[in-house]
Image (tube, rainbow, N blue to C red):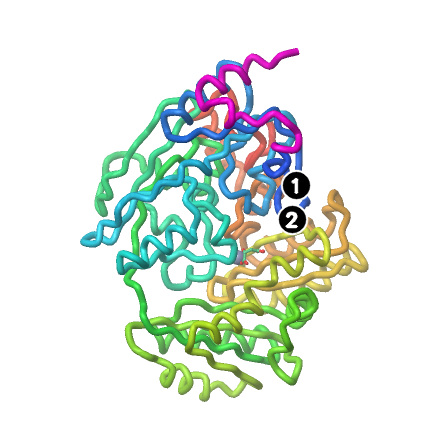
């Protein structure tokens, strides 16, 4: 039977941008860990905000649920269809406005990649404060919708802290626009901050006004071998208190480095095999290598170290951290948990979590890495069936026991919604449901994401 919605959408965006054939839809239907996939009714690719509004209105009229999608780098199953939804791809909204070099601000479309934004900011003598490994594919709309964090949160915060304004299409197809770039603006509810982190369930972000940060010209990276995470956190604390230029503080473990070596061909970073690796980066307007070396020299826990100043050397050290994701993916389909703990419980969590996983599913292989400065560990687990959530459950209970959060930066998606009551009260969830009902009464936008169906 012909799908009337297809014809309507073709009238809005043009024939080439409504994808109905299975092979054309395929790239939009599976996430890149391969854990989450579903069939879409169709994929629609509007060119601008007005077309997004018309698409949302048409879908509403047809009662067709919508899954908004950016670069499809999400890790919680929130940006791929679960079965029969319309995938609304925002990638064509890739316009970057001129950088306001006086205010240090820029407006960009939801489909702009993080790498393109970095380049635009750099060319104007500024920088963008958020960075993450999937920068070539991740889009700004998706990053705002998930309140993405990344490797510089310790200095600049996540997407929420960069957001000065937004434009979004609401569930009825109307457009809300607040893009003047005012640093101060106390005029009612902050809808932009509400949409940020809402994972496309309250509106479709089409453009944002973002704050930029000063471009730092001199960088130094240290890769450190320490006996364990507890020692690593001591080192991070020492650098943090001595050096305001600290921009990244990452931690990872031999199990992950082994996978990186296996799948990328990189040599082992050190002759010895430490219990934990820490990577710190400082960025300033002048060379601070001497200061960093001095702080590190006073840390008795460091058993080996490598310092890099030139860009290729820094990239070589970062590769041991940044290539974790692809190396884990090359090994199998992981369950990706992303948790935060209070910093003073992080080492205890790391010590206990491997046993907790082994007890839940003997033979499961945990690979841990993450943003040590933020208390955020990515607990990747290999060797699990897709639907076997015993290990996930055990990890989330440990997180709750230690006062942490089940999602630090990846979001809830469909992957973690069952565990929301572990760290959010009944009243809290009721308030979230009330907001969802008010803004999307028909449940059109990304249904089932964050909040489980009632
Ligand atoms: C990272 O920190 O590299 C990202 O959050 C991606 C991941 O967790 O794999
Ligand atoms: Zn991360």
For label 2, being within 8 Å of ligand 1 is answered: no
The residue depicted at 58 percent of the width and 80 percent of the height is 226
Looking at the picture, how far across and down is residue 124, in whole percent?
A: 27, 56
Residue at 61% over, 58% down: 325
Task: Give residue 26's position: percent from left, percent from top.
Answer: 64, 35
Q: Residue farthest to the left?
A: 102
Q: Which residue is mark 1?
A: 36
Q: Is residue 54 left or right of residue 372?
A: left
- Residue of label 2: 33
Residue drawn at (28%, 35%), measured in percent from left and top? 178
In the image, farthest residue toward the front = 16
Q: Relative to residue 443, is residue 330 drawn left or right? A: right
Most prominent secondary structure in the magenta stretch? helix
Mark 1 and ligand 1: say if the CB distance to the nearest ligand atom is below 8 Å. Answer: no
- Structural crowding at the residue carrying mark 1, measured as other residues with C-alpha within 10 Å and reported as few (<14), some (14–19) or many (≥20): many
Please name whichever residue, 314 or 77, is drawn nearer the observer in this view of the structure: 314
Looking at the image, residue 177 sits to the left or right of residue 20; the answer is left
Check disc 2 and report its element: helix, strand or loop.
Answer: loop
Residue 440 lies, with reference to residue 162, above or below; the image says above
**Magenta segment:** 1-24
Q: Assess disc 2: are there few (<14), some (14-19) or many (≥20) residues with their C-alpha within 10 Å of its C-alpha.
A: many
Q: CA distance from mark 1 to mark 2?
A: 7 Å
Which of the 4 image quadrants contains residue 85? Answer: top right
x, y percent for residue 402: 58, 59
Whether label 1 touches label 2, CB < 8 Å: yes
Q: Residue 13 lies in magenta, yes or no?
A: yes
What is the x, y in percent for residue 131?
43, 57
């Amino acid at each position: 039977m012909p799908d009337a919605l297809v014809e309507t959408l073709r009238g809005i965006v043009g024939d080439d941008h409504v994808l109905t054939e299975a092979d054309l839809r395929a790239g939009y239907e599976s996430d890149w860990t391969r854990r989450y996939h579903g069939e879409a009714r169709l994929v629609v690719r509007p060119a601008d905000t007005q077309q997004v509004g018309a698409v949302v209105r048409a879908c509403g009229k047809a009662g067709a649920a919508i899954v908004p999608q950016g670069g499809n780098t999400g890790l919680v199953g929130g940006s791929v269809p679960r079965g029969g939804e319309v995938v609304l791809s925002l990638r064509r909204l890739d316009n970057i406005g001129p950088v306001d070099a006086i205010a240090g601000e820029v407006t960009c479309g939801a489909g702009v990649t993080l790498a393109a934004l970095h380049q635009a900011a750099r060319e104007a003598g500024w920088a963008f404060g958020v960075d993450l490994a999937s920068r070539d594919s991740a889009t700004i709309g998706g990053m705002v919708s998930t309140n993405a964090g990344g490797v510089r949160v310790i200095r600049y915060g996540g997407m929420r802290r960069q957001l000065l304004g937004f434009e979004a299409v609401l569930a009825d197809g109307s457009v809300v626009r607040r893009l003047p770039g005012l640093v101060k603006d106390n005029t009612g509810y902050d809808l932009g901050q509400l949409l940020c982190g809402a994972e496309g369930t309250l509106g479709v972000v089409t453009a944002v006004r973002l704050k930029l940060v000063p471009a730092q010209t001199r960088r130094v990276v240290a890769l450190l071998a320490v006996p364990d995470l507890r020692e690593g956190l001591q080192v991070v604390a020492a650098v943090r208190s001595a050096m305001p230029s600290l921009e990244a503080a990452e931690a990872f473990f031999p199990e992950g480095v082994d996978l990186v070596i296996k799948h990328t061909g990189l040599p082992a970073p050190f002759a010895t095999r430490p219990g934990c690796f820490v990577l710190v980066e400082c960025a300033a307007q002048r060379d601070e290598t001497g200061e960093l070396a001095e702080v590190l020299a006073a840390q008795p826990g460091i058993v080996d170290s490598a310092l890099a100043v030139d860009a290729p050397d820094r990239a070589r050290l970062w590769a041991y951290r940044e290539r974790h994701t692809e190396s884990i993916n090359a090994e199998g389909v992981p369950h990706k948990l992303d948790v935060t703990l209070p910093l003073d419980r992080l080492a205890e969590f790391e010590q206990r979590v491997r046993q907790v996983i082994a007890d839940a599913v003997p033979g499961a292989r945990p690979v841990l890495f993450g943003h040590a400065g933020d208390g955020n560990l990515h607990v990747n687990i290999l060797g699990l069936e897709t639907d076997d959530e015993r290990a996930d459950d055990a990890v989330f209970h440990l997180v709750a026991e230690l006062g942490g959060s089940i999602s630090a930066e990846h979001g809830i998606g469909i992957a973690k919604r069952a565990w929301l009551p572990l760290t959010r009260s009944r009243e809290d969830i009721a308030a979230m449901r009330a907001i969802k009902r008010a803004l999307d009464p028909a449940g059109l936008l990304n249904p089932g994401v964050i909040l489980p169906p009632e």
